[in-house]
């Protein structure tokens, strides 16, 4: 049976960070998140919550089933794969584990996605930038101006510093690839059915709550690391980052996303949030930070720098803990 010690999971997590720094998101074989998405849509078609649209409790129960089956299946499949690799050779198990953990984090992938927005913005190709913004956000992008496109990229990188780095890595340390993949499944569920619209308000309730719970501690650790980085990065303000978290994070619709977004806004001296258009309907998202200076494309680069800084802190921390516990 496959059970790794804390020393082993720490080294696997460190190796996964390095793999992601170098390789990024795998193009082949198909990324595990794609298979999770297919599983979620398949289960949704079987459960067919629309048949019980007038029975909210029944729809909510179906959502609980969807969440339980998706998380259990994702974790179990990962466990079987690692167990099989271990059965062939211990080092094959290590390699497969580190590889799959690296697929649950996306430092390089986030950077590349953000740069696809940044480069056309600074070159004056706004239409191209809007296209690439549409790859990373769900909001309407056709009428975004330069500032709004920059804002969308900054918010995405800031928020996903938790979802695509800190959270999966912490779960990998706790339970290697199976637990990291369970987290990624929970996050994928939230992104697909965790909406508060009429279709998913009840059906996605469990998925959204599970994602909130799993990200609760990682989001707050991320806030601390962003403040530390703001202390050492030139041009950033750690005191303002702390103030912004306490002043604005609770206003965000998510109990977790407001922490990294407000910390980044405070550190950079910019304002995030504001008007967002979804499917042609405009809404106002809570504003994070103070507009000490205008938000600009270069803030995308600064936010990516903070993302990488968090990954360096995590890598150094993992190695330091390994030396202590070995």
Image: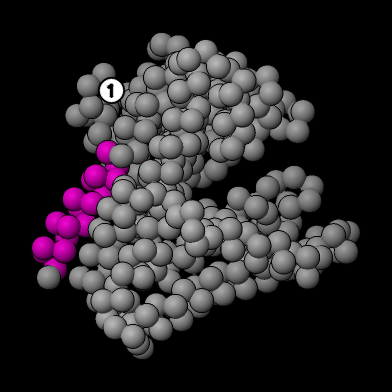
The count of marks equals: 1
Magenta residues, dominant SS class: helix
SS state under label 1: loop
Colouring scheme applied when the structure was drawn: one colour
| Image: 255 above or below 270 | below
* Residue placed furthest toward the front: 28
Q: Quadrant of the C terminus?
A: bottom left
Q: Quadrant of residue 290?
A: top left
Residue drawn at 57 percent across, 31 percent down: 132
Q: Is residue 111 left or right of residue 94?
A: right
Residue at 88% of width from left, 64% of height from top?
51
Q: Is residue 59 visible?
A: yes
Q: Is residue 80 magenta?
A: no
Among the 4 quarters of the image, the one containing residue 323: bottom left
Q: Is residue 108 left or right of residue 195?
A: left
Q: Nearer the viewer, residue 231 or 109?
A: 109
Residue situated in front as seen by the camera: 92 or 322: 92
The location of residue 285, given as percent across then percent down, is 60, 29
| Vertical position of residue 39 compared to residue 139: above or below | below
Query: Which region shows up in magenta?
Result: 309-325
Residue 59 location, x and y as percent? 78, 63
Residue 266 rendering spot, x and y as whole percentages: 37, 25
What residue sits right under mark 1 in the picture?
236
Query: Residue 23: where, in percent of width, then height?
Result: 36, 51
The residue positioned 44% from the left and 40% from the top of the image is 110
* Point 79% across, 47% down: residue: 198
């Amino acid at each position: 049976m496959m059970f790794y010690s804390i020393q082993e999971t720490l080294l696997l997590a460190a190796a996964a960070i390095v793999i992601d720094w170098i390789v990024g998101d795998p193009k082949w074989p198909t990324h595990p998140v794609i298979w999770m998405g297919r599983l979620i849509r398949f289960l949704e078609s079987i459960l067919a919550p629309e048949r019980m649209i007038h029975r909210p409790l029944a729809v909510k129960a179906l959502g609980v089933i969807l969440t339980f089956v998706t998380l259990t299946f994702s974790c179990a499949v990962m466990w079987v794969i690692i167990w099989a690799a271990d059965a062939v050779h211990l080092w094959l198990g290590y390699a497969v584990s580190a590889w799959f953990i690296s697929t649950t984090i996306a430092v390089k992938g986030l950077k590349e996605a953000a740069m696809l927005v940044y480069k056309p913005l600074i070159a004056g190709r706004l239409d191209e930038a809007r296209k690439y913004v549409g790859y990373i956000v769900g909001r309407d992008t056709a009428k975004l101006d330069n500032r709004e496109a920059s804002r969308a990229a900054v918010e995405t990188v800031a928020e996903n510093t938790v979802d695509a780095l800190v959270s999966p890595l912490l779960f990998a340390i706790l339970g290697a690839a199976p637990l990291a993949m369970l987290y990624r499944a929970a996050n994928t569920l939230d992104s697909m059915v965790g909406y508060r619209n009429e279709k998913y308000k009840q059906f996605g309730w469990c998925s959204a709550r599970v994602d909130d719970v799993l990200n609760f501690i990682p989001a707050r650790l991320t806030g601390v690391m962003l403040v530390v980085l703001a202390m050492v990065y030139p041009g950033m303000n750690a005191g303002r980052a702390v103030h912004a978290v306490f002043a604005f994070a609770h206003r965000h619709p998510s109990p977790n996303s407001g922490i990294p977004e407000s910390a980044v806004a405070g550190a950079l001296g910019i304002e995030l949030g504001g008007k967002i258009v979804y499917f042609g309907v405009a809404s106002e998202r809570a504003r994070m930070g103070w507009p000490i200076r205008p938000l600009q494309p270069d803030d995308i680069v600064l936010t990516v720098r903070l993302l990488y800084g968090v990954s360096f802190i995590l890598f150094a921390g993992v190695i330091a803990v390994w030396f202590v516990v070995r």
